[in-house]
Image (spheres, helix red, strand yellow):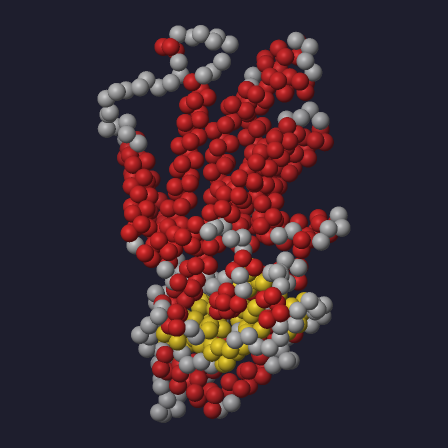
């Protein structure tokens, strides 16, 4: 609550003017060089250029699947996470059961199960025609259902990381349990779980490649289609790797920056 | 000390990884006993050597797993048994995925592959082909109650979705006939057919021989429509400069002359063929 802390206690790392070779993130330099080298190949070699442009056609789908899945999984994950720490016996057991079910099965298997068994069964159950649900939609549903469980666990850890005293203090101010959760616990928990949520965003981005098994035209599927007739395995998979590496690296740097920004203005 | 531990751990990891890499795929099936009689004079004799043959076991009637025995069978298995009986060799079938199969044979990972592989100039740059052993047409497989179109030409004018297996000549054919956004590439043909029955796609383009296999088993659900779309030769593939191409071609010729190929064709590609259930 201290808004005017002396600058010496600010949480930012001391900015060292002199570069010390030991503090340079060499791994980042190395990966950056790999990406730069691939970029150079793509620009200079027409074969690489052609394959790059082919893979680019799937980028929109990859980003769309990742973004939509992550946002929906956040919402469902929050609901499940709250259920996980709920004092209601039924709600808590339902949430824990769901989370353990999902976490106990490989993601690839779940993608098959959800797309080809659960979605058709459910849609027929409510009188919808499953064939109207495209495989892309099923892929997104699968990723949402899977990642909601992982994100729920993150929220649970975040909520449990806030000391009991916070809840007691809020209750003694006359707040209901729900109000205390909403105005006191969750805002603090949310800040604590941001890094972990960021990691899950990166994980969804990587796992979106798995939905290529459903024929969804994201960058992995486009690469597989292209390679099956061109036989340019080396070029195609190197470029595809560089695609993912660039995206995950940009995301994780962005997250680090966001974290620093958030921790430097603690109120 | 700490650093030493890390080094030790890493080297241990490398050793373990190396050991894993060294383990090769086990053959999926015991080959049907090839004749042990000495080959006739004048015939090519491979001296009983083992020939590793990549199959998918997911492409009926060429190769599939019999659910009763759990073993692979199909035209490829019988044809290679007959070829090896001619040449005095021992077929060893290796189950592998279609994706990368051509590349793997090109790299010499297998001595050959049999998977109803269409002979195309692009593929011939990667691998050596045997002579074509069958001429097949590509057809359109649809649900039994389909009335909205009756041929590929009509289908192309609609907005319906077409399923097929990724990386097949069928996919290439479809790409030439309609907008690629309408084509769903699946891992395997059984997937594509399941999607057709489910209604995820409205038609599947596949080789007629394979299509008949599916119709034979699901005649209440599926049918083939329209004229043959494109006609191709199928062949076995070998690494380039393989010494097996000539002997296998000679064996195929002999089997065509003595009626064995015709017999197998009737057994697997005829209207009576049904997959074991």
As displayed, is residue B107 above or below residue A92? below
Residue A12 visible in image: yes
Of B74 and A181, the residue lying toward us = A181
The percent position of residue B191, horizontal first and vertical second, equals 58, 61
Q: Residue at x 57, y 28 (%)?
A: A155
The image quarter containing residue B94 is bottom left
Residue B32 visible in image: no
- Point out the image quarter for the C terminus of chain B: bottom right
The percent position of residue A141, horizontal first and vertical second, equals 61, 45
The percent position of residue A87, horizontal first and vertical second, equals 69, 24
The answer to whether residue B128 is left or right of residue A203 is: left
As displayed, is residue A20 above or below residue A38? above
Q: Residue at x 57, y 77 (%)?
A: B228
The percent position of residue A132, horizontal first and vertical second, equals 67, 53
As displayed, is residue A146 above or below residue B192? above
Of B138 and A46, the residue lying toward us = A46
The image quarter containing residue A103 is top right
Q: Residue at x 68, y 13 (%)?
A: A175
As displayed, is residue A255 above or below residue A125? above
Q: Residue at x 49, y 13 (%)?
A: A267
């Amino acid at each position: 609550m201290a808004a005017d802390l002396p600058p010496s206690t600010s949480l930012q790392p001391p900015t060292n003017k002199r570069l010390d070779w030991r503090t340079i993130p060499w791994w980042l330099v190395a990966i950056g060089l790999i990406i730069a080298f691939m970029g150079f190949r793509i620009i200079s070699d027409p074969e690489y250029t052609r394959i790059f442009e082919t893979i680019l056609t799937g980028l929109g789908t990859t980003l769309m699947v990742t973004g939509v899945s992550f946002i929906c999984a956040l919402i469902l994950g929050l609901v499940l996470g709250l259920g996980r720490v709920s004092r209601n016996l039924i709600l808590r057991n339902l949430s824990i059961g769901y989370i353990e079910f999902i976490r106990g099965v490989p993601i690839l298997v779940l993608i098959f199960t959800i797309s080809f068994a659960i979605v058709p069964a459910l849609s027929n159950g409510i009188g919808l025609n499953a064939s109207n649900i495209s495989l892309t939609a099923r892929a997104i549903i699968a990723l949402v259902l899977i990642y909601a469980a992982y994100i729920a666990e993150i929220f649970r850890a975040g909520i449990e990381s806030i000391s009991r005293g916070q809840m007691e203090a809020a209750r003694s101010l006359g707040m209901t349990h729900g109000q205390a959760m909403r105005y006191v616990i969750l805002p603090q928990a949310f800040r604590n779980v941001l890094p972990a949520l960021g990691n899950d965003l990166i994980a969804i981005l990587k796992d979106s490649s798995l939905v290529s098994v459903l024929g969804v035209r994201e960058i992995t599927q486009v690469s597989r289609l292209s390679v099956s007739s061109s036989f340019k395995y080396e070029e195609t998979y190197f470029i595809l790797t560089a695609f993912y590496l660039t995206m995950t690296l940009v995301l994780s740097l962005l997250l680090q920056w966001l974290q620093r920004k958030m921790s430097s203005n603690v109120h | 000390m700490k650093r030493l531990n890390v080094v030790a751990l890493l080297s241990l990891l490398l050793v373990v990884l190396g050991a894993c890499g060294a383990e090769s795929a086990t053959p999926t099936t015991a080959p049907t006993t090839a004749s042990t009689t000495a080959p006739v004079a004048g015939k090519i004799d491979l001296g009983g050597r083992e020939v590793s043959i990549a199959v998918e076991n997911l492409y009926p009637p060429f190769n599939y797993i019999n659910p009763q025995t759990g073993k692979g069978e199909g035209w490829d298995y019988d044809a290679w048994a007959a070829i090896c009986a001619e040449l005095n060799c021992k077929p060893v079938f290796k189950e592998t995925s279609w994706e990368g199969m051509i590349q793997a044979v090109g790299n010499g990972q297998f001595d050959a592959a049999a998977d109803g592989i269409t002979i195309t100039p692009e593929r011939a740059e990667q691998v050596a082909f045997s002579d074509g052993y069958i001429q097949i047409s590509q057809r359109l497989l649809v649900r039994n109650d389909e009335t909205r179109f009756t041929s590929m030409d009509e289908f192309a004018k609609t907005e319906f979705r077409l399923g097929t297996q990724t990386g097949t000549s069928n996919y290439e054919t479809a790409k030439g006939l309609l907008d690629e956004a309408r084509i769903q590439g699946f891992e395997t043909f059984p997937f594509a057919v399941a999607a057709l029955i489910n209604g995820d796609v409205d038609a599947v383009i596949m080789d007629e021989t394979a299509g008949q296999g599916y119709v034979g088993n699901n005649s209440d659900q599926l049918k083939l429509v329209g004229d043959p779309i494109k006609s191709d030769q199928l062949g076995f593939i070998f690494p380039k400069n393989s010494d097996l191409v000539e002997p296998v071609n000679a064996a195929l010729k002999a089997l065509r002359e003595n009626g064995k190929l015709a017999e197998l064709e009737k057994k697997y590609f005829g209207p009576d063929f049904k997959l074991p259930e």
